[in-house]
Amino acid sequence: MTQGLEQRADRRPQAPGGPRAHTQGSSPAPDVNPHVRKWIDKCVEMCQPDALYWCDGTAEERRSLLERGVAEGVFLRLNQEKLPGCYLHRSNPNDVARTEQLTFICTPGEDMVGPTNNWMEPRQAYAKLRGLFNGCMRGRTMYVVPFVMGPVGSPLARVGVQLTDSVYVAASMGIMTRMGQVAWRELGAGDGGGDDFTRCLHSIGDVNPDRRYICHFPLDNTIWSFGSGYGGNALLGKKSLALRMASFLGWQQGWMAEHMLLMGVTEPGGRKSYLAAAFPSASGKTNFAMLIPPEKYRKQGWNITTVGDDIVWMWVDPSTGRLRAINPEAGYFGVLPGTNERTNPNAMATMARDTIYTNVALLPDGDVWWEGKTDEPPTEAVDWMGQKWTPSSGRKAAHANSRFTAPMTNNPVLDDLADDPAGVPVSGIVFGGRRSKVIPLVFQAFNWTHGVYVGATIGSETTAAATGQVGVVRRDPMAMLPFIGYNIRDYLVHWFRMRKRMSDCPRIFHVNWFRKGEDGRFLWPGFGENMRVLKWIVDRCHGQAYAVETILGWMPRPQDIDLEGLEIDLQDLESLQSVDAEAVKAELLSQEELFLRLAGDLPKEMVFQRELLISRL
Ligand code: GTP
Ligand code: SPV
Ligand code: MN
């Protein structure tokens, strides 16, 4: 059936005009195995695309996809002298962030997804979405996007195939994953080829939020997403496969998929440690992963390298009993507002070429701008919705969740082992939230079990990365609330039990870069200066720095954090690290929100840890 389609499309190189006429001819089919062929045939029959385009993942292809997008009005070519290989995409204004309320896990029983997920019964979900997918690609091209998550050859690497009618999504998947022929090779051709690939079906549909569904079928290794073309809703390798589906699989197979950055820290003596850190969406992962140490530290020989900025897959190496990790992704989908040469120069260098900018402002010379890129706004621009904009327009020029999509190979501080199938050993795990009050700059958990409790009770102020109210404190266990693909009870039990698989486990920490003073300004300078906290953390991982015991955990005294070269008054530092018993009591009460949702299902370790905290109070 796909064979016939290729011929038909070849005879119709140009479809009639109009915004939905997205057919620009097919490409020859590669030698895919019968499992793949059968599944694609079924999807083609349902969606009825006019053409089928098989992505091969070459550099020429990426350029041609971007240029197809330009022809369709999906991309604008930016100033190629200033920003070689860079393009601008404007998404539909109703489609600018993940929509958690429209995201479902579809399993036979509701108990499998637990109290923190939306649930749909699989047969009902398929029936509902089939109604939407039926004929939805008439007059359009279906892109076949094969991809591998994780370094090829890694024990955890997984293959996915995404079918999509969005050239923006196809081009973005090419940046975010190891996309192309490599995936078919991994899967195997011919009759001996494998069936173990995640079936990702995506259509942007008519971008109507009333007909938007992101449905995960963990038991079928299938994801169906309809009605959104943005970020985690549409780039299905990312949150859908690498977190929701993978967390479910990790639970069953004894490994972990987490919403974490992964960084290398090299000390003056040459010793290198790797840390994984979980901060909720838009709360500092990309920035921390690309940190440039203050001058004093650089001179001493401190160096930070990036393995990943958003997701890790971790397993216990049976030969050492230690946790190892890979970054399943190959690119960054990073927040733009607030990013500049001062806060994150490595991100600026990363997005200087071969980058897709989404929902930023366009300058008259074909450059881009977003709030915080420069201190002074441009005198005129076209805003993220395509409207004329000036500083007196009274609205943002770029969307608060505007982002860049860039290959990790552009990162000047990419870690040498970022593509190593064996991954890297993890010495420490850092949890963090965005908290203007109560939570100190840094503390260390007493042990793994306490650390899991600390991670499970992270509170964070919501951000523009998901639709909904911004700035309200919610519990975001392990920064995974929107991404745990199964019952949170089983997820927490899995975390506690992982300890038993390890002979030596990572130390666990909590940080908060976002505490504010009475006057509303950040007390901690953040960004590169986070190195000062990081040094204490790395020292603690090696049993070196001093700490005092507090009700929350081990904390550095002011003199244990090296402040040389930093202009911060001692009073601010004291406020940053202050732990107010009354405020912690209120914090404990606000954790009830999570505990009540879990009700009778709370793992006993959670109850014990809370009792211990109360007794310390
Ligand atoms: P996702 O991609 O949504 O998962 O976000 P992320 O966790 O990678 O967050 P990112 O590093 O992109 O930062 C989000 C926002 O927080 C940006 O506006 C940053 O400028 C800001 N930010 C990051 N680190 C710091 C910090 O140390 N201090 C302060 N004040 N702001 C920070
Ligand atoms: C997040 O929201 O945590 C992101 C962006 O990293 S998205 O890919 O849209 O999920
Ligand atoms: Mn994220």
Image (tube, helix red, strand yellow):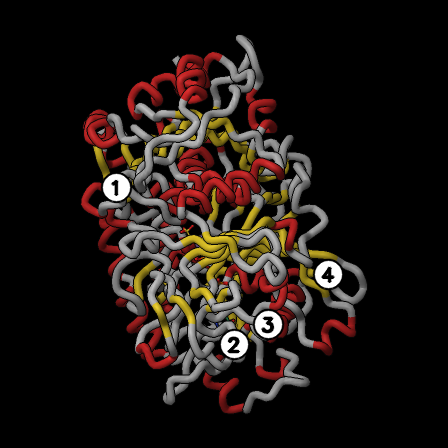
Outermost residue, top direction?
Answer: 191
**Classed neighbour count for the residue bearing mark 2: other residues with Cα under 10 Å, few (<14), some (14–19), many (≥20):** some
Q: Nearer the viewer, residue 505 or 250?
A: 250
**Classed neighbour count for the residue bearing mark 1: other residues with Cα under 10 Å, few (<14), some (14–19), many (≥20):** some
Q: Which residue lies at the image location 46% right of the left edge and 75% below the top edge?
A: 440
Q: Mark 4 or mark 3, which has the lower sequence index? A: 4
The location of residue 428, given as percent across then percent down, is 59, 56
Q: Which residue lies at the image location 29% right of the left edge and 68% below the top edge?
A: 472
The image quadrant of residue 342 is bottom right
Q: Can you tell which of label 2 and label 3 is closer to the viewer?
A: 2
According to the picture, the residue beneath numbered tag 4 turns out to be 266
**Classed neighbour count for the residue bearing mark 4: other residues with Cα under 10 Å, few (<14), some (14–19), many (≥20):** some
Labelled disc at residue 374: 2
Q: Nearer the viewer, residue 509 or 401?
A: 401
Q: Mark 1 or mark 4, which has the lower sequence index? A: 1
Q: Is the residue indicated by label 2 positioned so its CB lies within 8 Å of ligand 1?
A: no
Seen in the image, is 240 located left or right of residue 586?
right
The location of residue 36, given as percent across then percent down, is 46, 18
Q: Mark 2 or mark 3, which has the lower sequence index? A: 3
For the question of whether residue 254 can be seen, the reply is yes
Q: Mark 1 or mark 2, which has the lower sequence index? A: 1
The type of residue carrying mark 3 is Glu
Q: Mark 3 or mark 1, which has the lower sequence index? A: 1
The location of residue 427, given as percent across then percent down, is 63, 54
According to the picture, the residue beneath numbered tag 1 turns out to be 206
Labelled disc at residue 341: 3
